Image (cartoon, rainbow, N blue to C red):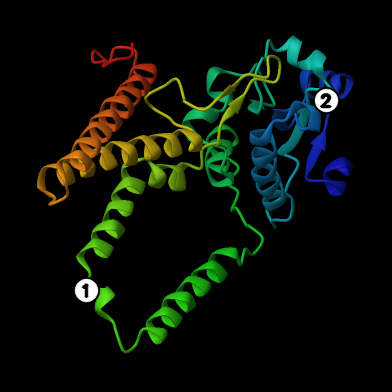
């Protein structure tokens, strides 16, 4: 309780972990984030997860319902590598719940790659494991309203400057491009990211290997949605070029170039899309150009 009064997330090394978490008896649960925050580890996901974990821990520490029933702690790889070895842990960040009685079960290992590390998702998991319900309270963030206000001001200023010529508002190409951008964003999985709050990518602290594509069809990374959006946009551009080559009034040479470019874009990026599907769903039967 003295440690928790000083900082919401208690930092543990190997000795403190063995003494206050592993050694019985205990009348409290401990939720631990195993991470790698040192700059040389270059774990950007760890920093993002650490921010969300601190939001959750602060919400609990400064709530009126705060008790000694559950504590939040962290173990950094460079301060407690022996703990990582003890638990056979080879990735970070990882969240584990150590109950007050008995050994941790499978459900005490948080499914980070499925549920994401948003504080709200972590709070639901903590409630399932400890019956402690934490209302997540975030510090005020004015970036969203300011950005929206700036965008509205820019649109209003443009409309004012063009007040004598508003034909661009009735330009079908402008609305078609806007609708296409919206469709590409939605089909790439941006809404799923907004709801689940997944990590941008995953880096193994031992090998340093970074994964941008999630290996399961039940989850995804933010970087993965950006890659899929780019590939879908390239395929769409290829289709537009093919349509223009077939219907435009340009000379035959330019139309041939547009046709070849369109076919190349569709074949190449559609093949990459299929390879992503095969990587996420190992029983996916289709491929094209690439295995």
Please name the residue shown 54% across and 46% down the image: 120
Q: Is residue 140 left or right of residue 243?
A: right
Q: Is 111 or 68 nearer to us in this picture?
A: 111
Judge from the rendering whether residue 23 lies leftward or rightward of residue 276; answer left or right.
right
- The label on residue 203 is none
List x then y, in percent, for residue 19.
86, 21
The number of numbered badges drawn on the structure is: 2
Question: Image height check: is 243 above or below 213?
Answer: below
Residues at marks 1 and 2, CA–CA distance in whole angstroms? 68 Å
Place residue 96 in its image quadrant: top right
Q: Position of residue 183 (x, y in %)?
A: 29, 49
Q: Badge 2 local density, few (<14 within 10 Å), some, or many (20+)? A: some
Q: Position of residue 38 (x, y in %)?
A: 80, 31
Name the outermost residue toward the left.
247
Circle 1 is placed at which residue position? 170
Whether 25 is drawn above or below 152: the answer is above
> To which residue does mark 2 refer?
20
Q: From this viewpoint, is residue 239 visible?
A: no
């Amino acid at each position: 309780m003295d440690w928790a009064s000083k900082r919401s997330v208690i930092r543990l090394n190997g000795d403190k972990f063995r003494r206050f978490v592993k050694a019985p008896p205990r009348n409290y649960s401990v939720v631990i984030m195993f991470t790698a925050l040192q700059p040389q580890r270059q774990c950007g996901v760890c920093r993002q997860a650490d921010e969300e974990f601190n939001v959750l821990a602060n919400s609990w520490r400064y709530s009126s319902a705060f008790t000694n029933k559950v504590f939040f702690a962290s173990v950094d790889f460079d301060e407690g590598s022996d703990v990582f070895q003890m638990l056979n842990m080879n990735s970070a960040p990882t969240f584990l719940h150590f109950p007050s009685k008995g050994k941790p079960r499978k459900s005490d290992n948080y499914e980070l790659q499925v549920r994401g590390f948003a504080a709200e998702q972590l709070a639901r998991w903590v409630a399932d494991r400890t019956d402690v319900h934490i209302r997540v309270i975030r510090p005020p963030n004015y970036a969203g309203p300011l950005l929206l206000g700036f965008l509205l001001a820019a649109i209003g200023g443009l409309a004012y400057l063009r007040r004598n010529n508003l034909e661009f508002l009735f330009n079908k190409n402008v609305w078609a491009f806007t609708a296409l951008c919206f469709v590409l964003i939605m089909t790439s999985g941006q809404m799923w990211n907004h709801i689940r709050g997944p990590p941008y990518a995953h880096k193994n602290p031992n090998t340093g290997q970074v994964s941008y594509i999630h290996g399961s069809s039940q989850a995804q990374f933010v970087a993965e949605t950006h890659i899929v959006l780019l590939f879908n946009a390239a395929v769409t551009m290829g289709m537009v070029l093919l349509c223009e080559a077939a219907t435009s009034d340009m000379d035959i040479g330019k139309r041939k170039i547009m046709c070849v470019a369109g076919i190349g874009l569709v074949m190449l990026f559609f093949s990459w899309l299929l390879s992503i599907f095969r990587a996420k769903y190992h029983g996916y039967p289709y491929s094209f150009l690439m295995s």
